[in-house]
Image: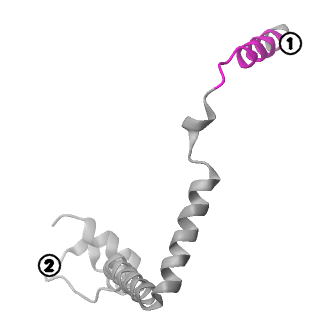
Amino acid sequence: MLNLDALSNRLARAISQAKLTNAALNAPNADIFQRAALSYWARTLQDPMQAITQQIGFLNQTGRNIAEAFHPFVSTNQDQHTDRRFTNNAWASNSLIRLLKEQYPY
């Protein structure tokens, strides 16, 4: 118990003697984010088609990224290799198990 009290006192001393950091070095203040948001909305109101085009492009790219990420899970590509370790039908029918199968070297 004495050891715990000694450690607690040591921690309290270390915290009380810690140097304070300059708050300006930590992160930008809220004013920068507010100006950025106001600038964005001002440009959006001036040219709404540009904002819509950017959003459509963003959603299109997001869809492509998702499709690429899930391609191994939905791939119907059957390999030409036959390996007796993978004779169970689950290796071909379950996409997650098939992904594991594709990791094995032949």
Residue 64 x, y percent position in the rendering: 33, 83
Residue 32, percent from left and from top: 56, 55
Q: Label 1: state its secondary structure.
A: loop
Q: Which residues are magenta?
A: 5-20
Which residue is under mark 1? Answer: 1
Q: Which residue is mark 2?
A: 81
Mark 2 and mark 1: Cα distance apart in space: 66 Å
| Magenta region includes residue 41 | no
Name the foreground residue: 46 vs 21.
46
Q: Amino acid at mark 2?
A: His
At 14% from the left edge and 78% from the top edge, which residue is drawn?
81
- Pick the front one: 104 or 86: 104
In the image shown, does 96 or 37 lie closer to the viewer? 37
Q: Are marks 2 and 1 in contact (CB under 8 Å)?
A: no
Counting other residues with Cα less than 10 Å from the Cα at mark 1, is it few (<14), some (14-19), or many (20 or more)?
few
Which amino acid, mark 1? Met
Residue occupying image coordinates x 58% and y 37%: 24
Could you tell me which secondary element the residue under label 2 belongs to? Answer: loop
Mark 2 or mark 1, whichever is nearer to me:
1
Q: Position of residue 83 (x, y in %)?
A: 19, 74
Q: Does residue 88 appear in the picture of this structure?
A: no
